[in-house]
Amino acid sequence: MPIVKFHLADKDISDGQIESVIEQATQIYAEVLDSPVDRIRVFVDLHAPNLIGVGGKLVSKGGKNAPFFEFIVMKGRSLEQRQAIAEQFTNILAVTLKVDKADIRGNCYTVEPENWSIAGSLASEIRKAEIEARAQAGA
């Protein structure tokens, strides 16, 4: 279920850098949340530099390249996990895109299992079924 969207300026960014961000973000989610890789989704949303303003200045006119990311985790993930993800996502953007960490912003959204859909079913119902299946397997 882990999902992240990186909002990046479409300026001096290569396919290789985008691929690196996607691969590293996937690995971070997998390690920090102990999540199967096939459940992780990473999106890169490129924005035209003339549509991004930082401090009132367009990136296309010399404004800072200041990436922003939004990530989603299921409610119940610890503050330490969320902080580790935010810190590591910031680090990969700073290193990969060669931007100052101080200019990177991020937001974490926590979602209740009953408000998250997986293959058309609510995560709360899927979790309930998984717990019941494990209990029956152990009986």
Image (tube, rainbow, N blue to C red):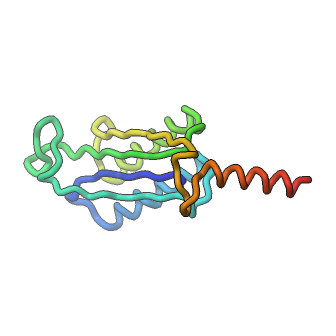
Residue under the point 86% across and 57% down: 137
**Of 55 and 124, which appears nearest the observer?**
124
Residue under the point 28% across and 53% down: 8
Horizontal and vertical percent position of residue 120: 54, 61
Q: Residue furthest right?
A: 139
Residue under the point 41% across and 49% down: 92
**Of 40 and 57, which appears nearest the observer?**
40
Q: Residue furthest left?
A: 61
Horizontal and vertical percent position of residue 65: 22, 46
- Tell me if 26 is positioned left or right of 78 in this view: left
Residue under the point 15% across and 35% down: 55
Residue 14 higher or lower than 74, as above or below: below
Horizontal and vertical percent position of residue 9: 23, 53
Horizontal and vertical percent position of residue 97: 31, 52
- Tell me if 123 is positioned left or right of 50 in this view: right
Q: Answer with the quarter of the image where residue 112 lies.
A: top right
